[in-house]
Amino acid sequence: MQKVGKPFPAFCFLIRNAMQKQQFFILVIIALTLSACGLQGEKEQPVEPTGMELYDPENYFSRQEGDSLIIELATYIGVKPGGATSKTRFEPRFRSYYKEYSKQFRMLFLHKTGEGWHYYYLLRPARDLQGNNRGVGGKFLIINGQITAFEELFNTPAGDAQTLEEIGKILFSELVEKENVDGYLGKKQYIQWPDERLKYDKVLHEWRYDAQ
């Protein structure tokens, strides 16, 4: 009498195979979901710019020219010495003060436009519990080594030099590309002022609450 083979092993194999396929598809769906969530999270963070070596200040000025330039910028940006006003701070009698004071400044990024404007980002000293530096970005025109037009466009919160350099990469790339940083206004982790109250006075070259 011929023996009939048992169907159970084959049946079990089919079930096991189907379950493995189902598990595979579930894993694929989970992986795709996690990937989508990761991409969404990345969109919320600015992409760190590359090619920042293009904005090395030494691409535009020699070391000696850079030293003279930073003294000029410190005169516009820095704290005035005793007895100086918004207008008189540029007088030669205050030059020695700004020459010494400028040693606390550090130019990080420079870019010259086709129209002759220099966009800049530098670190200046700050007195704040959050750090000893503050990032400053803006633009100026220079003729024969002398600044003929100048404007601060933004100041970052106070912080340490490394953090402000990373913030500067993002803001400066935006400034070069769009000629403004409007997209970051109101984001206090990047820009402390201008804000709804504090504006830059282009005549006095100061941040003021009564500037138009």
Image (cartoon, rainbow, N blue to C red):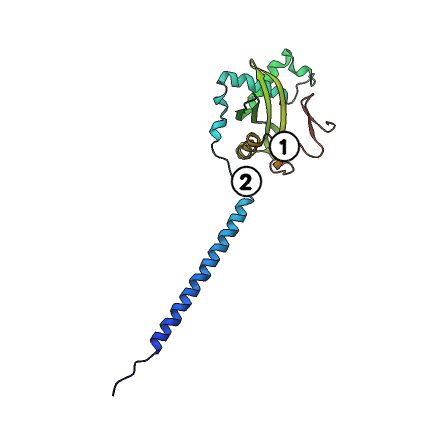
Pointer 2 with pointer 1, Cβ within 8 A: no
Query: Which numbered marker is on residue 68?
Result: none
Classify 8 as above or below 211.
below
Residue 179 percent location from the top left of the image: 59, 29
- Horizontal arrangement in the rendering, residue 7 relative to residue 148 (left or right): left
Counting labels gives 2
Query: In the structure shown, which secondary structural element does the residue marked by tag 2 occupy?
Result: loop
Q: Amino acid at mark 2?
A: Pro
- Horizontal arrangement in the rendering, residue 152 relative to residue 7 (left or right): right
Q: Amino acid at mark 1?
A: Asp
2 or 1: tag closer to the N-terminus: 2
Query: In the structure shown, which secondary structural element does the residue marked by tag 1 occupy?
Result: strand
In front: label 2 or label 1: 2
Q: Residue at x 57, y 20 (%)?
A: 102
Marks 2 and 1, how far apart at CA: 26 Å
Classify 75 as above or below 30.
above
Q: Residue at x 54, y 47 (%)?
A: 41
Q: Residue at x 47, y 29 (%)?
A: 53
Location of residue 145 (image quadrant): top right
Classify 93 as above or below 115.
above
- Horizontal arrangement in the rendering, residue 119 relative to residue 2 (left or right): right
- Horizontal arrangement in the rendering, residue 52 relative to residue 196 (left or right): left
Residue 70 percent location from the top left of the image: 56, 20
Q: Residue furthest front?
A: 114
Query: Which numbered marker is on residue 46?
Result: 2
Q: Which residue is mark 1?
A: 128
Location of residue 124 (image quadrant): top right
